[in-house]
Amino acid sequence: MKRAGPNGMPGNPFRTTLTAFKTTHMNTVEKFIRLHRQTKPLLLPNAWDAASAKIIEEVGAPAIATTSAGVAWSLGYPDGYQMSAILNAQVAERIVRVITIPLSVDFENGYSDDPAVVAEHVKRLLDAGVAGINIEDGRDSPDRLARKIEAIRRAAESYGSNLFINARTDVYLASLVPEADRIRKTINREKHYAAAGASGLFVPGLTDGEEIARIAENNTLPLNVMAMPGLPKADRLADLGVKRVSAGTGVAQVSWQTVARVVQAFLTDGDSAVFAEVAMPFGKLQDLFSGVN
């Protein structure tokens, strides 16, 4: 029997479900935004599929991001705009299905140079229930990324979402400008992206404490850095003004190096004991997914 609506007519179960979904989505986005306002930086591990995401949630992460490289590798593609936006969205859907914490998706360059097309791609992620995205400038002009951010923000607002748009600049990672100009160029891009509607600034490759502090002091957006050799620990980063630290490809690389090591040992002499040394118990993995619909 259909439940009656407020006017006495049969209610619309689809509309009720959609409303509940959007309410949950908005709550998840707001939770993700609040994680960028705490004193200690948000430590954000990066997953590449539903299983890695569920394990990351299980060990206590307050939120999860995807790694575009890890996702691409897991699907048989090299990193760098080679997989499709549809595949990226499908991975996001599978991850959201199994976790209860916010998910931010590495959206690379939006998979198009056309802001309108990028906005359409984002709608798939909004439908999946993601709380945030990363979108990067790479070697494109800051103006191009700003136009994409504006289009994404409009699409999110039309959906009723305050989607967290993390604008990534590759000024440091790709050495886009001479070393002496990196701080100034990064600050200029932050202002440009903030005006376009960005929620945060991601500067992978930035590790020097003094440079981090100078950029953070001149930012209006929460500053995100990436885990890599030479980066100070979280407590020091908090003092420098950092609000988020992403693991990047680190978790995926460690996982697959472990696969290579144990398989090589197994192939060497057929000793099955090598798997027991590092294996997560079968029963624990089953339990992680037993309650998932």
Image (cartoon, rainbow, N blue to C red):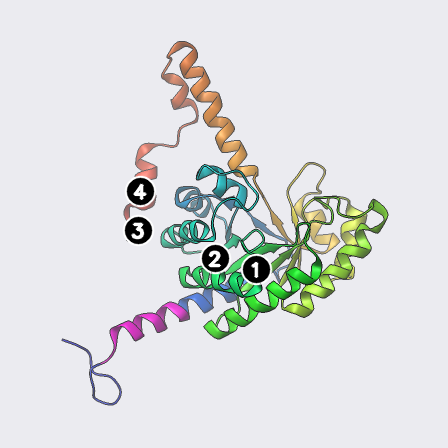
* Disc 4 target residue: 287
- Is 226 positioned to the left or the right of 260 in the image? right
* Disc 3 target residue: 292
- Total marks shown come to 4
Work out whether residue 198 can be spotted. no
* Disc 2 target residue: 102
Q: CA distance from mark 1 to mark 4?
A: 28 Å
Asked whether the beta carbons under mark 1 and mark 2 sit within 8 Å of each other, the answer is: yes
Which amino acid is tagged 2?
A: Pro
Image vertical order of residue 19 relative to residue 167, above or below? below
Q: Residue at x 83, y 46 (%)?
A: 178
Please, what is the dominant secondary structure of the magenta stretch?
Answer: helix
The residue at the far front in this view is 114
Which numbered mark, 3 or 4, is in the foreground of this view?
A: 3
Q: CA distance from mark 2 to mark 4?
A: 21 Å
* Disc 1 target residue: 35
Which span is picked out in magenta? 11-22
